Image: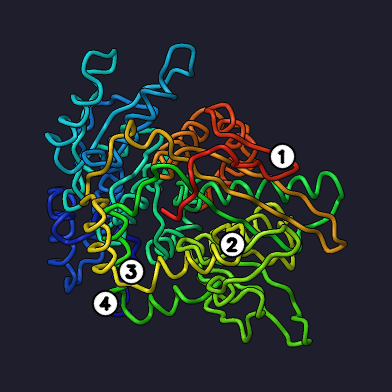
């Protein structure tokens, strides 16, 4: 096998850690390899065997990673990475407002980032005069493998908020967590990055490490809602879920897309053709689909990484359904396209696959899941489509700047200025026999809810781990945390309405952000 082929087989951490430059830093290994090379043509078999033993011993010591570590042996329940900007501000605000007040669960934590001074400035701004004013600050850069190792070794759970993930080698941190047995959470919403993370599913599963990307309002809350609807239908009626849908709405002084979000979208737009092809596949993150479609054409169960491509995707699963304005007569509303539906539908399909793979019980063997923006009338739905338009990232940025609603990367409005913001997720599930169940989840501004989802899932992994059904793999938030995660969200103040959709009457006017 060529050296190039060998390199392609390496996981991100392996490629960085077992690079020639890094291996040469460990003198016993470098010396042993040089001696072995010098004896390659020798006829003294005993010497060659002795050299091989020396290489094996040095390699075992090298794989231990402690030789290169500066870790001070302090261990934190949570380490937040990438918290020098606006997302860091939201994480710290959530800690202050909801996770750390008296009477709440006690846990230790540290903040980290590429530039320690920037992280320290944010900590000082947020925690001055509080018992957490001296929260430890760590520094880690992806091009400094020792710093990454030390940060990961210091954490029981890493919360990575340093995006755009596909531009920052986030998969290297994921892989380091797998190697060093540290659970991992992030708030990503990028299909290309998700595919890189899910490629590490087997390694994470074998290592008994929980890897949970997309623990945010985008991805995480829809995932949890569908999990609960499927559970309720099975508990009450003993049936699988055949159809499921989610509607999103928001209102008040909700934020427009942030500079970081726009940067992420721009990065995905610049992806190569292979990545774009994967992004357009409704089952790119995995899925579980029926053996036969309605026309009797043979179908294939697909999972990420198998190399199997379905000969046909059911019409009801196609992305085209997400882009249409249409009436939902069952639920008495209209639907309009929602930008995250092209990501979140794939997350839920992965959850369905994981429930089949890990527990032998998918939400539904023939599940169809779609989602849209909630609209009360056809007029409102068409007006929303017209207002959003098919604009480029640059055009969207200019539109926001003109309206005075644009914030650059790492910046955003203070929570006090969007205190009336709300977001609501309406869920509907139906069994093959026609049994139905509805529920809704309502929270505050979507970006703030991202902090809630990430932190509560990280606490779930840290303190509820022994009770969790699944203990390892690249999982979705709902599959990882299950009912324990749902309870934490409920106890944190997120509003659940079971059995019907909660009315938003009396709340500030709705918007589409």
Category of crowding for the residue at label 4, using alpha-carbon neighbours closer than 10 angstroms: few (below 14), some (14–19), many (at least 20): few
Q: Is residue 251 above or below residue 259?
A: above
Q: Residues within 10 Å of mark 2 (few under 14, many from 20)?
A: many
C-alpha separation, residue under disc 4 versus residue under disc 1: 54 Å
Residue at horizontal 18 percent and vertical 59 percent from the top: 33
Q: What residue did someone put label 1 on? A: 498
The secondary structure type at the circle numbered 4 is helix
Q: CA distance from mark 3 to mark 1?
A: 36 Å
The disc, 3 or 1, on the residue closer to the chain's N-terminal end is 3
Quarter where residue 411 is shown: top left
How many angstroms separate mark 2 from mark 1 (CA)?
A: 19 Å
- Going from N to C along the chain, the mark reached first, 2 or 1, is 2
The residue that mark 4 highlights is 4
Residue 246, image x, y percentages: 62, 56
- Furthest-front residue in this view: 379
Kindly identify the residue that appears in the image at 55 percent across and 53 percent down.
248
Tell me whether the residue at label 3 lies in contact with that at label 4, contact meaning CB atoms closer than 8 angstroms: no
| Lower position in the chain sequence, tag 4 or tag 1 | 4
- Label 2, label 4: how far apart the Cα atoms are: 42 Å
Is residue 13 visible from the viewing direction of this image? no
């Amino acid at each position: 096998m060529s050296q190039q082929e060998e390199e392609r087989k390496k996981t991100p951490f392996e490629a960085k850690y077992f690079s020639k430059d890094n291996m040469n830093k460990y003198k016993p290994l470098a010396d042993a390899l040089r001696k072995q090379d010098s004896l390659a043509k020798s006829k003294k078999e005993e010497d060659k065997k002795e050299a091989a033993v020396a290489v094996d011993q040095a390699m075992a010591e090298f794989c231990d990673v402690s030789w290169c570590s500066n870790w001070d042996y302090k261990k934190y329940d949570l380490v937040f990475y990438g918290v020098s900007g606006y997302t860091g501000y939201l994480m710290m605000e959530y800690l202050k407002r909801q996770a750390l007040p008296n009477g709440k669960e006690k846990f230790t934590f540290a903040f980290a980032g590429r530039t320690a001074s920037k992280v320290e400035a944010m900590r000082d701004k947020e925690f001055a005069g509080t018992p957490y004013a001296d929260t430890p600050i760590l520094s880690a850069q992806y091009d400094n493998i020792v710093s990454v190792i030390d940060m990961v070794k210091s954490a029981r759970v890493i919360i990575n908020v340093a995006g755009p993930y596909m531009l920052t080698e986030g998969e290297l941190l994921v892989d380091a967590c797998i190697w060093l047995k540290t659970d991992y959470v992030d708030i990503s919403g990028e299909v290309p990055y998700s595919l890189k993370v899910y490629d590490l599913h087997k390694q994470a599963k074998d290592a008994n490490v929980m890897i949970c990307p997309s623990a945010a309002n985008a991805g995480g809350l829809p995932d949890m809602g569908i999990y609960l609807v499927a559970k309720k239908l099975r508990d009450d009626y003993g049936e699988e879920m055949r159809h499921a849908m989610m509607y999103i709405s928001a209102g008040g002084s909700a934020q427009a897309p942030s500079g970081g979000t726009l940067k992420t979208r721009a990065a995905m737009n610049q992806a190569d053709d292979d990545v774009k092809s994967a992004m357009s596949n409704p089952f790119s993150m995995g899925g579980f689909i029926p053996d036969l479609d309605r026309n009797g054409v043979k179908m294939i169960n697909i999972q990420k990484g198998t190399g199997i491509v379905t000969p046909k995707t059911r019409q009801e699963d196609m992305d085209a359904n997400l882009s249409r304005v249409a009436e939902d007569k069952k639920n008495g509303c209209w639907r309009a396209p929602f930008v995250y539906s092209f990501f979140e539908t794939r997350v839920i399909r992965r959850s369905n696959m994981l429930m089949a793979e890990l527990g032998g019980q998918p939400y539904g063997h023939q599940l169809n899941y779609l989602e849209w923006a909630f609209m009360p009338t056809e007029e409102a739905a068409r007006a929303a489509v017209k207002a959003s338009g098919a604009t480029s990232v640059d055009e969207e940025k200019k539109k926001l700047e003109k309206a005075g609603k644009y914030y650059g990367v790492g910046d955003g409005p203070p929570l006090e200025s969007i205190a009336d913001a709300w977001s609501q997720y309406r869920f509907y599930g139906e069994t093959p026999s026609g049994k139905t169940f509805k529920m809704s989840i309502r929270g505050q501004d979507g970006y703030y809810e991202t902090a809630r989802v990430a932190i509560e899932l990280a606490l779930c992994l840290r303190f509820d781990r022994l009770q969790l059904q699944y203990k390892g793999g690249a999982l979705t938030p709902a599959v990882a945390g299950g009912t324990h995660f749902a309870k934490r969200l409920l106890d944190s103040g997120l509003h659940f309405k079971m059995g019907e959709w909660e009315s938003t009457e009396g709340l500030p006017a709705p918007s589409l952000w």
